[in-house]
Amino acid sequence: MPSNAAVQENFQEDRKAEYRAFVASISDSDCFGDDIWHCDRLKKHPADRSCVLHFVNVPEQFKEAAKYFIVLKLLGGMRVSSARQHVIRLIWFLQFLELQGEEDALYCCTSSLVAGFKAYLDENCTKEQVKNGIWQVIKNFFDVMQGWEGRKLYNHFAGNPFVQPLHYDEKLIPPFVERQLDRLFLMPEIQLHIRAAYWIMRLFPTRVSEVCAMEPDCVKQFDGHFVLFLPSWKQNGGYNQAEMRSLHIEYEGIGKYLIDLLHEQQEAQRALSPYLTENQRGLLLAYKKAWYRYGKWAETVVRKHNVLTATPNHINVFFKRYCEMYGVRDENGILYVLKSHMLRHNGITDRLAEGFTIEQIAHMTGHKNDQMILKSYNHLDLRPEVLTEKQRLVLGESDEPSPVMFHGRILSMNPQTEARLLENLRAHRVRGGICSDITGCKCDMQACLNCRYFVPEIEQIPFFEEQAEAWRIKAVRFKAFPIIQKNAAANAALYQEAVNKMKTYLEVTGDEKNS
C-alpha cells in the first residue's frame, strides 16, 4: 500500500537544485523541464508499466509548482502510480484557477473561491469518492507548498465537504460469493492467464503485482512434489532485487489443477515469447489480445501489438468483467466486483481459521512479522463460528500455573481438563510432555527414527506401538489437509518400523537361546 505519510517534507526554496537533480536521477533521459517524466528507476517490479508522469494538461502558470509538489511526494516514498493520481486530481483545481483569470491565483485563494470550486466539482464530477480524493490532494498541496516563491499560501481546504462513503467490509469475499468465483474460474472459457492468476492468489495469499512479475520457470519439481517460486518486493526493505518465496505444492486435487494450469501457461508464454518486447520475455503471464463476441472469444492474428504481459490493472479489469459476464452476485442480488487484493485477505483469514501458525502464514505472504497479518488481514471477527470453536479450546482459568508432566499425568490440571486437552486434533503426547500444536512445530521430532544410527530401547516397545497407532489415527483425521496427512502417515510408518525392528530382534535372540 503506498504511503504518503512516510516523510512529510515542505517545499524549501534553497533546495530547488536538489529537487531537480532527483528528477534526473530517476531516469536516463528526463529533466525537470519536460512535461512527461519516465520514472523507470522507481519501478516496483518488472511488470510495472505505470512509471510515467504527465504534466501536459497542467496550466502553464502552475506547472512548476505542481512539479515540485510531485517531487516532494516521490521523495517522501510515494509510488509513481499514486503520484500520477495526485497530478490528475490537482489538475481539476489548477484548471479551475486558470478560468478565474487571476495572475496570482494561488495567493488569492479565498474561502469564496473555494466555495466556487466546490460548486464546480458538484457540477462536473459525479462520484462522491473522487471529489473527496480531489479535495484531499488540494489540501495536501497547500500544506506541502508553504513557502513557494517565498510567500505564505493560505489553506482554505481544511474541512472536506465530500465525505468518503462508508462501505461494509469489502476486503473479505463472503463465502456465498467465494463459491461462485471458484466455479467461475474453473471454466475453460476464462482466459488462461486470468485463471492462472486467480488460482495462484486464491491458494497462496500473494499480491497481484508479484503474480504479474512471476518468471516462466517459476514452478519446479522437487522430491515428489512441486515448488512454486514467487517474487516479493514489498517486504524486503528495497525494491531493486526481489526476495523469492518457495511454496510447496502436492500434485493432487486443486494443487494438481494449479500445476497443470501453470504448465499450460508456460507453453503459451514460449509460443508468444518471440512477439514480446525484450523486457517482457522474462514474465510468465503472456497473453494474446482477444475480443468476446457472440458468446465466445474471437480468434485474432498473433502480431507484436496483439501480444502483451499481464499487469495488475489488467487482471483487476478482467476479474470485474468476468463477474459481470457470468452474473456473480452477492446475497442481496447485487453484481459483485472482485478485486485481486481481496484474495489475499481471504487467504490469510482462511489460514488463521484453519489453525496455521503466524510463522507459516508469514512464509506464504512474505511478511517479516505478525503486525500486518493480525491487524490488517485478520477478519476472524466476521466469522463468529470460528471464534466460538476457538473459545471451546481455551482450557482452564487464565491465572492457573503452567501444567507440567509427571509419569504421563499433567500436574496442576485435573483429569477432565487433561483429557480435553489431548482431544484437541493438533495436540500430541511426546516424551516428557504434550505438544499442543504438532502442525506448527519447526523441529523434526522423528529425525532420530529416520537415522540409521538410532537404536531403540526394547523397554520402549509399548511407547512406540502407542505412537504408531496415534499417528495412524491422525492421518485419518487430517484427511482434509493432504500435506499434514502425508506427514502423519510417514510418522506412523517410522514408529511401526522401529517396533518391527525391536520385535525381530527379540525373535532372533529368543531362537538363538532356544537353540
Image: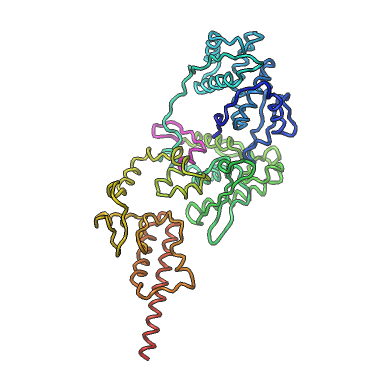
Q: On the picture, is 163 further left or further right than 289? A: left
Task: Report whether residue 279 is seen.
Answer: yes
Q: Main SS of the magenta segment?
A: loop
Q: Residue at x 72, y 31 (%)?
A: 24
Residue 428 locus on image (x, y percent):
36, 59
Residue 418 locus on image (x, y percent):
28, 56
Q: Residue at x 50, y 33 (%)?
A: 324
Q: How is the image coloured?
A: rainbow
Residue 425 locus on image (x, y percent):
35, 55
Marks counted in the figure total 0
230 in relation to 44, above or below: below
Q: Nearer the viewer, residue 268 or 353?
A: 353
Q: On the picture, is 266 further left or further right than 252? A: right
Q: Quadrant where the N terminus lies?
A: top right
Q: Residue at x 53, y 58 (%)?
A: 225
140 in relation to 335, above or below: above
Residue lying farthest bottom? 515
Residue 339 locus on image (x, y percent):
51, 36
Magenta segment range? 328-347
Q: Quadrant where the C terminus lies?
A: bottom left
Q: Nearer the viewer, residue 51 or 436?
A: 436
| 59 in magenta | no
Task: Report whether residue 299 is seen.
Answer: no
Q: Nearer the viewer, residue 164 or 410?
A: 410
515 in relation to 321, above or below: below
| 346 in magenta | yes
The quadrant holding residue 478 is bottom left
